[in-house]
Image (spheres, rainbow, N blue to C red):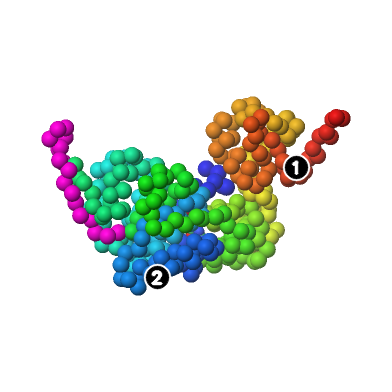
């Protein structure tokens, strides 16, 4: 598991429940989504009905699960949490849908990874609050329609564009979650530090925020590692120096790059003069699988403007040379 990976690891799951904001007012940042959702929920409450289905799109760790729980709590409704990959057969979905209570929130994480038959069952359930349960097999099979109580589906996906249009169109509201600004992550860190009872000053929080890759889950994880360091190596309080030293130990640099990111960037600069170089060659040079380089390291390097993917191969940007403290080679005479 990477310290700067955005997916939840076992350690995260244990503490995340405690660190999750419980109401919309406590949820940091994402002001557009928050304002829009606030209207959707208030209007539904005034009508005394169930909120429209909500689609949340955005990278892992940005707060989609947290928002779905907030939706349930603002609607004073229970919540059921499941995910696309967990629903292999339409029957799995039918079982969940038919056991929902009126007004319940169903959170479906990674909704784009649901099986096709389940997806088609979901269309009808979302639109008409009805499913057809198939009884029997072969030519004798019959579809028995089953009425469902009104419920609110909250779907989460990394990109709304991954969903087939008929599914996307059945959501009344889509919220796009953005990466967080450093100031917003500082607020997340101060809030978590308070809940974890760790003394953290402004600069210490800023130091952690700058290395958190725009992602609250990573910010909370780095905070916990810095807390360990502060406790073992100092008096427990977190300031800029302690945070910097702790994250140096964990090899997370000032911009949030870890060892893998720096090794990819370092090879691109030092062995290939900044590129262009093909993905396979670059992967061999760093001794990693192609997929690891392409899917784990590159997205953040591209987002940070350190690496570009071009038709001729991977190319380092001037910012990459500056970040690793190297000088780009002189251009040859033309
Ligand atoms: P996702 O479902 O998008 O992967 P989560 O909702 O599980 O992300 O959030 C990951 C962690 O980050 C949780 O511990 C949560 O408390 C924290 N978090 C996410 N967004 C916020 C936010 N806007 N304010 C405060 N904490 C947040």
Viewed as shown, does residue 50 lie left or right of 329?
left
Residue 206 in which image quadrant:
bottom right
Q: Is residue 188 magenta?
A: no
Question: Who's the residue at 65% across and 47% down the image?
Answer: 304
Which numbered circle lies on residue 174? none
Question: Magenta part of the protein: which range?
Answer: 135-151
The C terminus lies in quadrant: top right
**Dot 1: within a 10 Å radius of its alpha carbon, few (fewer than 14), some, or many (20 or more) residues?**
some
Q: What number is the disc on residue 318? A: 1
- Mark 2 lies on a secondary structure that is helix
User: Can residue 99 be seen from the camera position used here?
Assistant: no
Q: Residue 153 location in percent, x, y?
A: 35, 55
Residue at 52% x, 43% y is 1
* In the image, the residue with mark 2 has its CB under 8 Å from the nearest atom of ligand 1: no
Which label lies toward us, 2 or 1? 2
Residue farthest to the right?
Answer: 333
Depth check, front residue: 294 or 160: 160
Q: Which mark is residue 42?
A: 2
Residue 160 is situated, as x and y percent measured from the top left of the image, at: 46, 48
Q: Mark 1 and ligand 1: say if the CB distance to the nearest ligand atom is below 8 Å.
A: no
Horizontally, is 264 left or right of 47 in the view?
Answer: right
Residue 269 lies in quadrant? top right
User: Would residue 307 be visible to someone looking at this image?
Assistant: yes
């Amino acid at each position: 598991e990477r310290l700067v990976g955005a997916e939840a690891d076992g350690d995260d799951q244990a503490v995340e429940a405690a660190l999750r904001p419980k109401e919309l007012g406590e949820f940091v940042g994402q002001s557009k989504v928050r304002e829009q959702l606030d209207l959707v929920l208030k209007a539904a409450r005034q009508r005394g009905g169930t909120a429209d289905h909500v689609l949340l799109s955005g990278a892992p760790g940005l707060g989609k699960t947290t928002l779905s729980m907030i939706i349930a709590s603002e609607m004073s409704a229970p919540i059921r949490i499941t995910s696309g990959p967990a629903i292999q057969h339409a029957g799995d979905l039918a079982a969940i849908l038919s056991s929902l209570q009126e007004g319940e929130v169903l959170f479906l994480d990674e909704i784009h990874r649901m099986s096709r038959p389940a997806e088609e069952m979901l269309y009808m359930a979302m639109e008409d609050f009805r499913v057809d349960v198939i009884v029997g097999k072969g030519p004798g099979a019959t579809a028995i329609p089953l009425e469902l109580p009104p419920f609110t589906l909250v779907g989460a996906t990394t990109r709304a564009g991954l969903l087939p249009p008929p599914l996307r169109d059945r959501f009344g509201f889509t919220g796009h979650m953005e990466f967080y600004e450093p100031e917003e992550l500082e607020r997340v860190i101060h809030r978590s530090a308070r809940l974890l009872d760790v003394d953290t000053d402004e600069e210490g929080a800023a130091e952690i925020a700058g290395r958190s890759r725009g992602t609250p889950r990573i910010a909370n994880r780095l905070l916990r590692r810095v807390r360990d360091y502060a406790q073992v190596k100092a008096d427990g309080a977190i300031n800029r120096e302690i945070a910097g030293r702790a994250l140096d130990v964990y090899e997370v640099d000032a911009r949030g790059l870890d060892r893998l990111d720096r090794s990819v960037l370092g090879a691109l600069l030092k062995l290939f003069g900044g590129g262009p170089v093909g993905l396979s060659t670059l992967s061999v040079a760093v001794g990693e699988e192609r997929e690891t380089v392409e899917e784990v390291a590159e997205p953040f390097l591209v987002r940070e403007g350190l690496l570009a993917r071009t038709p001729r191969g991977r190319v380092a940007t001037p910012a990459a040379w500056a970040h690793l403290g190297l000088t780009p080679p002189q251009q040859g005479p033309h």
